[in-house]
């Protein structure tokens, strides 16, 4: 199964995602299921993004790999 690394976590301003497999989309949702960010990078296994427009709190990062598998990681935006 694909493995992902999300760091730094918790974070205050940015997060980098590294995956052992290519992925096709990444979503950041809050605990109510509201989608706050959605990315579809060209063909990367490493991706970095800003948290500047997210409120402080807990989010779920969902990564869809090119084989259809989905991996979810809890992420904390801190002050």
Image (cartoon, rainbow, N blue to C red):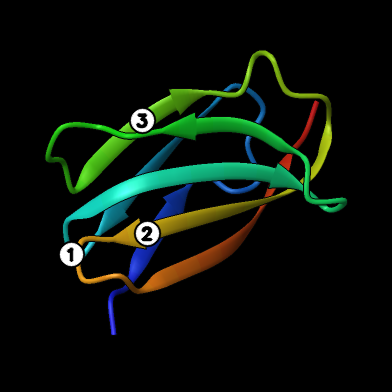
User: Disc 3 vs disc 1: which is toward the camera?
Assistant: 1
Q: Regarding mark 3 in the picture, which secondary structure is present there?
A: strand
Mark linked to residue 63: none
Residue at the disc numbered 1: 21
Place of residue 67 in the rendered image (x, y in percent of width and height, measured from the top left): 21, 71
Q: Work out whether residue 39 or residue 14 is closer to the camera in this orientation and state it.
A: 39
Other residues around mark 2 within 10 Å, as few (<14) / some (14–19) / many (≥20) = some
Mark-to-mark CA distance, 2 and 1: 10 Å
Seen in the image, is 26 located left or right of residue 55?
left
Q: Regarding mark 1 in the picture, which secondary structure is present there?
A: loop
Residue at the disc numbered 2: 64
Q: Is residue 18 above or below residue 49?
A: below
| Between discs 3 and 2, the one toward the N terminus | 3
Mark-to-mark CA distance, 3 and 2: 16 Å
Place of residue 13 in the rendered image (x, y in percent of width and height, measured from the top left): 60, 21
| Between discs 2 and 1, the one toward the N terminus | 1
């Amino acid at each position: 199964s694909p493995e992902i690394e999300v760091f730094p976590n918790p974070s205050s301003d940015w997060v980098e995602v590294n995956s052992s497999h290519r992925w096709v989309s990444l979503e950041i949702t809050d605990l109510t299921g509201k989608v706050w960010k959605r990315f579809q990078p060209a063909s990367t296994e490493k991706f970095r993004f800003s948290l500047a427009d997210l409120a402080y709190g807990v989010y779920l990062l969902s990564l869809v790999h090119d084989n259809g598998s989905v991996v979810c990681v809890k992420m904390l935006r801190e002050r």
